[in-house]
Amino acid sequence: MLFASAVTTFLSLVVAATPLEDRGGHKSNGCSSGSDQPIFHSFFNNTLTQATWPAAKDVAFSHLSLAGWRSDALRGAAGSWANLTADARSAILKDYHRLGKTLRVSAFGQNDNVTTNANDPEEVAASLSKFAADYNLDGVDINYEDFAAVASGAAFDWLSKFHAKLHSDLEASNPHAVLTYSPVADWFAKKDDVWVRFIQAVESDVAWINIQFYDDGSFNWTDCTQLLTKTGSSSYLSRQEIADLTGFPVTRIVVQKPRQENQAGFISGTDLGKCFKATGAQFSGVSLWRVDPTNTNLSRDWVNDVVENAGVCKNHKFAKNAQHDLGICTSS
C-alpha cells in the first residue's frame, strides 16, 4: 500500500460523507487534487481535557499530530487522548473529520532514545500501532530524535525494523492510516547518511516528511535561499537539495518551523511566505511546532500569513467562516 495515496483517500472518504452545506458550500476543498494538495500540519503538545480540546473550526491545519507518545510513558496531548472517555474521543473525531481533518499520534521526541536504550524496534512499533488503533486515530507521525544512534549509524537497522513492523500493523488495522516522519534537517547531508538511506528505502510507504529546519544552533535556515533552494554548505542542505539527494519528491517534503519567536530558526509566516514567492520554490505546505490550544489565533495567523504571502493558490484563501475553517486552501 502507498501511504502517499492514503492522505487523499482518507480525506476524500471524509469529505464525501459530509453534506455539501457542512463543507462551506464549496465543491472543491483544495488548491489542487490528489497528492499535489499542500499539506498543513501541526501538533498539539499540551495536556488537554474534553473541555479544553480546540474545536476543529478553530484550528487552521488539516493534519494534527498529538505529541507525547513515548516508549516508556504517555504524556501531553497523546496522554490526554488516552484519558478521555470513548464518547469524548468519538465526539472530537467527528468534529475534526466533518471538516476533513486528521488526528494522529506523534511518537518519541527529545530524549526518547529508543535505539541507544536498546528497546526492541518491533515491540515498540507494535505498541505504537496498537495505541493508534485502540484509540481510533488516523495514523502516526514519527519524531525520532536519538542523535547518538544516528551518529553511530545504529539508527538505520533499528528504524528499518521498526518501520517494517509499524507499516505492516497500521495497514492491517486501518488501510487508510497516514504515516509520516519528522526528522531534523541536519541528518541530510551525504548519500550514505542514515536518514538519507532510510528515507529512500521507505519512500513509497510514507505520505510526506516534515523536516525540522531549525534548532541546530549554528545553522537555522532563516535565509530564503538556504531554506528552499541552495545553502552553499556541504553540511547543511536546503529543501530542494534534500529532495535531489534522496530522490524524495519535493512536493512531499514539508518545511517545519517553530511558532515560538525565541526558538532558534523561527521565521514569521509573512517572511516564510515571501521566501516561497521570491525563490519560486514549489509550495508543498508547512508544518508548525506547535498549536497553542489556549490561543489558536496565534498559529492561525502564522499559517494564513504564509499562504497570503507565498502567492500560491491564486484566487484562493483559507476559509475564514467560523464554521468551515478547513485549514486548507478553499475557493473564495
Image (cartoon, helix red, strand yellow):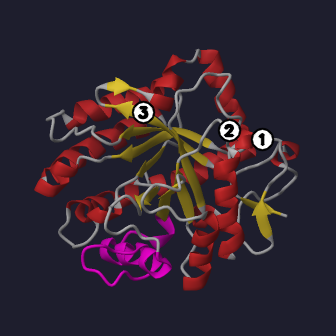
Label 1 element class: loop
Q: CA distance from mark 1 to mark 3?
A: 31 Å
Name which of mark 1 and mark 3 comes first in the sequence.
Answer: 1
Q: Badge 1: how crowded within 10 Å, few (<14), some, or many (20+)?
A: some
Which dot marks residue 18?
Answer: 1
Q: Which residue is mark 3?
A: 68
Q: Badge 2: how crowded within 10 Å, few (<14), some, or many (20+)?
A: many
Which dot marks residue 137?
Answer: none
Label 3 element class: strand
Q: Quadrant of the C terminus?
A: bottom right
Q: CA distance from mark 2 to mark 1?
A: 9 Å
Residue 312: x and y in percent read 68, 74
Query: Which residue sits at x=29%, y=26%?
Result: 72
User: Mark 3 belongs to which amino acid?
Assistant: Gly
Q: Nearer the viewer, residue 39 or 211?
A: 211
Can you tell which of label 1 and label 3 is closer to the viewer?
A: 3
User: Mark 1 belongs to which amino acid?
Assistant: Thr
Q: Answer left or right for 147 relative to 55.
A: left
User: Mark 2 belongs to which amino acid?
Assistant: His
Residue 238 vertical position relative to residue 53 in the rendered view, above or below: below
Residue 80: x and y in percent read 51, 24
Which dot marks residue 97?
Answer: 2
Residue 127 vertical position relative to residue 33 in the rendered view, above or below: above
The reply to whether residue 37 is visible in this rendering is: no
Residue 316: x and y in percent read 78, 68
Identify the magenta region: 223-252
Q: Nearer the viewer, residue 81 or 171?
A: 81
Q: Answer left or right for 87 relative to 115.
A: right
242 inside magenta stretch: yes
Residue 204 vertical position relative to residue 169 in the rendered view, above or below: below
Name which of mark 3 and mark 2 comes first in the sequence.
Answer: 3
Residue 320 vertical position relative to residue 168 in the rendered view, above or below: below
